[in-house]
Image: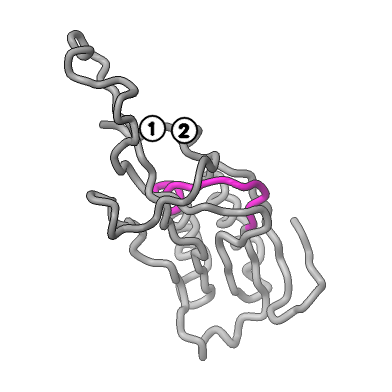
Amino acid sequence: MPVRPARCYKRIKGPPYTREEYIHGAPMIQIPKFDMGTTSAAARTAFTMTAKLVVEERGQIRMQALEAARQMASKYLTKYVGDANYYLRLNVVPHHVLRENRMLAMAGADRLQEGMRLAFGSPAGRAARVEPGQVLFYAEFKPEHLPHIKEALRRAASKLPLPTRIVIEPKGNGGNKTVT
């Protein structure tokens, strides 16, 4: 069956559903990498700037949207900046298991389904629950790559169902921020 639109899942309803030992058939997390670019700590000392993609509303982001955003940002940065010139990290993990009470839509379906009886639903996907101000993506880079980093995070934000903002600041800076 096709995936339902993001509007079906982006609002938080009820407590998190994360206990995998009680959930049979929970899908695996389909995000292969959370760290991209230069991942060694020694090489990252040359980076003097940081950028963050910060979410502005409370909600849920499905793992498909997170993976699409990760791929978009990573491919753009690899093409225009090069793998050795940035570090990008996806900070959220989709632990919450989404449920779906599938309904059939065909002739004679009323004899096959139960309607709202036993409507708890079966596992249909995963989502990350986020709060306002939570960092989704974190990037380290050199100042000359700032326009490309901003564009990569802007493209990643276009794949997400919640409004976001990009925060640029010097690395290791305690309080001074530049919000764009």
Q: Quadrant of the C terminus?
A: bottom right
Count of labels in the image: 2
> Closer to the camera, 4 or 122?
122
Q: Which numbered disc covers residue 97?
A: none
In the image, farthest residue toward the right: 176
Element under disc 2: helix
Q: Residue at x 34, y 23 (%)?
A: 116
Q: Which numbered disc covers residue 4?
A: 1
CB of mark 2 within 8 Å of CB of mark 1? Answer: yes
Q: Residue at x 32, y 36 (%)?
A: 121
Q: Which numbered disc covers residue 8?
A: 2
Residue 6 in the image: above or below residue 34: above
Residue 78 in the image: above or below residue 54: below
Q: Quadrant of the N terminus?
A: top left
- Where's residue 132, x and y in %? 66, 53
Report crowding for label 1: few under 14, some 14 to 19, many 20 or more residues within 10 A (C-alpha): few
Left or right: residue 114 versus residue 141 is left
- Where's residue 51, x and y in %? 65, 66
Give the residue type at disc 1. Answer: Arg
**Is 59 one of the magenta-colored residues?**
yes
Element under disc 1: loop
**Is 70 one of the magenta-colored residues?**
no
In the image, farthest residue toward the bottom: 42
- Where's residue 120, x and y in %? 34, 35
Identify the image quadrant of residue 94: bottom left
Q: CA distance from mark 2 to mark 1?
A: 7 Å
Give the residue type at disc 2. Answer: Cys
Q: Which residues lie in the magenta part?
A: 54-66
Report crowding for label 2: few under 14, some 14 to 19, many 20 or more residues within 10 A (C-alpha): few
Left or right: residue 165 versus residue 41 is right
Left or right: residue 81 versus residue 180 is left
Q: Residue at x 48, y 70 (%)?
A: 82
